[in-house]
Image (tube, rainbow, N blue to C red):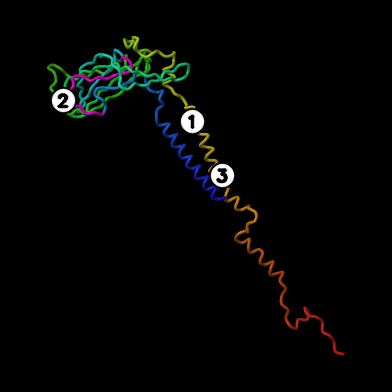
Amino acid sequence: MRSRFVTARNILSRAMAALAATLVVSLLLPAAPASAHGQLATSTPLTGTVVREPLTELALFFTEKPAANAHFAISGPNGSRVDSGWSFGEPKRLDKPVTEYFKVNGVFEPRLYHTGFPAMVTVAHWPAKGRYTASYLSVASDGEAVRGDVTFDYQGPATAAPAGWSPPTAGPEPALLAQAEGEGSANSGASGGPADATAAPSEPAGAADEQRDGGFPAWLVPALIVVVVTAIVLVAARRRPTARGASTPGRRPAGPARRTGSPARKAATPAPRKPGNRAGGPARRGRR
């Protein structure tokens, strides 16, 4: 019986460890519906790649047209900027479609986007070899901020800066920052952003706020209940072998309990008679 309880305890221990690992991974990984709309689909060059020729511009492709007041910057190895403005490019079909989630009647539904809308960022010059970072900040049609970086390594020849050019120092516009922080208009079209037919479909009112605030995960409550029940079963499995071993009928009691029968046997054994014992022996016959 003890081996069965040990096996059950091992199985439950492994199940509890697997469940705990699943909970940790689920809490660390972001939920799919939380991805922002109008996200970056691809870029030229791709992040993490090596560039060996001095490109004149970088292309960042988004799932919808960037806002007109979007901000783009390219920083070189020493931190100084080398960008010189940006413009809209011609849309192209993506090699790999991008999935985004929209809330319809309280349920998140995936939508595939096959077209990329580029922002062409001009590169003034390449001062040195090293790591370059292209950063972007925009606002999607649903009011969510679209921000991120594309980092790559440049190993091409150095080029001189154009005559009269100076590194830009201007940051994002205050209106763009207000929209990105949720303080401005809920639709970037109000500030000149994408308002054409190619933009992502609009969502019901308040859908962006509900998607941004996920609240307490509904699956966490039953998962915690399973963990608590498993812990209770493990504790019970550890205590049962000891309790059953002490109360199982048919087993001889161990330890001092075995010695209790020996005095009774000695007491029941008659003592040997000694010769000449008048008290215990038969009465002597008198002489005639």
- Looking at numbered disc 3 in the image, what kind of residue is underneath it? Ala
Residue range in magenta is: 48-65
In x, y percent, where is residue 247?
Answer: 63, 52
- Looking at numbered disc 1 in the image, what kind of residue is underneath it? Leu
**Which disc number belongs to residue 220?**
1
**In the rendered image of this protein, does residue 216 appear above or below residue 282?**
above
Image point (38%, 20%), residue name: 100
Tell me, yes or no, whether the two marked residues, 1 and 2, touch with CB atoms within 8 Å: no
In x, y percent, where is residue 166?
Answer: 16, 18
Tell me, yes or no, whether the two marked residues, 2 and 3, touch with CB atoms within 8 Å: no
Residue identifier under label 3: 236
Image point (35%, 21%), residue name: 98
**In the rendered image of this protein, does residue 254 appear above or below residue 158?**
below
- Whichever of callouts 2 and 3 sits on the residue coming sooner in the sequence is 2
Q: Is residue 11 left or right of residue 253?
A: left
**In the rendered image of this protein, does residue 134 appear above or below residue 205?**
below
Residue identifier under label 2: 127
Q: Callout 2: 10 Å neighbours few (<14), some, many (20+)? A: some
Image point (55%, 45%), residue name: 237
